[in-house]
Amino acid sequence: MITSEYEFLRGFLKSRSGLVLSNEKQYLVESRLVPVARRHDLASLSELINSLRKPGTKQLQEDVVEAMTTNESFFFRDKTPFEHFKEEMLPKLLEKRAARKKIRIWCSAASTGQEPYSLAMILRENKIKTSSYQFDILGTDISKEVLDKARLGQYSQFEVQRGLPIQMLMKYFTQQGEIWQVSNDLRAMVQWKFLNLLENFSHLGEFDIVFCRNVLIYFDQPTKIDILNRLAKLIPADGYLVLGAAETVVGLTDQFEPVPHMRGLYRPKQSAGKQPEPQKMANSLKAEPISARPAVGKPHVPSFSSPATNTPATQNTMRTNSASAPDKPQKFDREKLNASLDSLRRLNAQSSNKG
Ligand SMILES: C[S@@+](CC[C@H](N)C(=O)[O-])C[C@H]1O[C@@H](n2cnc3c(N)ncnc32)[C@H](O)[C@@H]1O
């Protein structure tokens, strides 16, 4: 690819998805876009770029944007945000929303769905406290492929191996051959929508909690500032913003302040002029039918870990081909999973024999 073509692509991606590509990422662009060119019967990347410049190539444009997204995700990723959810956000909001009995959560870069489903599992684990409340969980992403997969709720053994405690696997998934299917109960708790964070999202209404994790890292400063300031408008004064481990609001906006001693957790600044509860709920989410469309397109390439340790692997290790994915390669321990599954099955069989 010649320099002018690469420059065109960089500008195209920046304006469409916010993705900022450095000069050294040419290899990544090539490896991700060659398959797109083939799918569109284009003989080379130069041809692909020529086509992109023409009007009427919407599908190609979408496919290029999708191919350049990095969709790395796993269940209970980074653990701490989910502990904060359980220990801080949930108890406080249950108290503060006692009159309204409704709590809205938005995972704004939900990828293949592990983040919203992790939250749904925590809610189910706390059923006694939460059962009288309505929880709306919305997962959005710029990639239709990952949304299809999220909606379907099907994960490979590798994917459920990453971060998901074995008890939760047994409780909320069923094994169908090589696939682990999320229960219909959890699937019904989450709604999915296509949404580009660069575009207006005020129509979604207010959210008590917004997860915006591991997506701002791909954007430049003005884009991060713009998104954070627009998010601040959707979160009431007693709500929360959750960012990824490599992300912060510091130096970008004064609309949020960190929650002391809770890394990655922010609240709108009280002085930002917003009132806590009661607040208007602009748009309640309309239930979308859960489609059973098959996952399509680019395979998700997970890296593997033992849920117990998350230690870097020396064997059975894969790495995502991400632009700057902050995660280390991790280890997949199939034997350990099978052994745990066997013992859980034995325990289940023993208890049903007794009953
Ligand atoms: C690395 S994943 C993060 C997934 C999850 N939040 C987590 O932390 O595990 C980043 C996601 O952001 C999505 N994304 C990238 N640019 C976006 C944009 N402009 N609007 C919405 N989503 C975007 C990608 O498609 C990808 O699925």
Image (tube, rainbow, N blue to C red):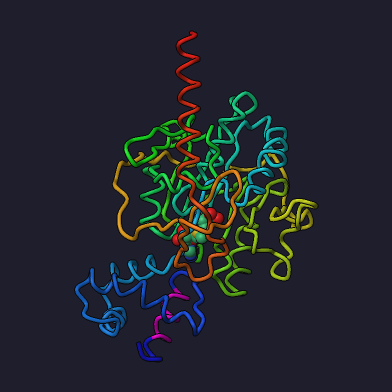
- Name the residue rendered at 30%, 75% in the picture: 34
Dominant SS in magenta: helix
Q: Is residue 61 above or below residue 131?
A: below
Compare residues 187 and 133 and report the one nearer the observer.
187
Q: Is residue 338 above or below residue 229?
A: above
* For residue 143, side relative to residue 164 (left or right): left
- Name the residue rendered at 76%, 52% in the picture: 259
* For residue 244, side relative to residue 155 (left or right): right
Q: How many marks?
A: 0
- Name the residue rendered at 40%, 85% in the picture: 6
Q: Quadrant of residue 257?
A: bottom right
Q: Does the magenta run of residues contain 11?
A: yes
Compare residues 29 and 255 and report the one nearer the observer.
29
Q: Is residue 73 above or below residue 284?
A: below
Residue 201 in view in this figure: no
Q: Quadrant of residue 318?
A: bottom left
Q: Does the magenta run of residues contain 39?
A: no
Q: Position of residue 293 (x, y in %)?
A: 29, 45
Compare residues 315 and 222 and report the one nearer the observer.
315
Q: Position of residue 199 (x, y in %)?
A: 48, 64
**Residue interval drawn in magenta:** 6-15
Quadrant, the N terminus: bottom left
Q: Position of residue 205 (x, y in %)?
A: 55, 49
Q: Residue furthest top?
A: 355
Residue 92 in view in this figure: yes
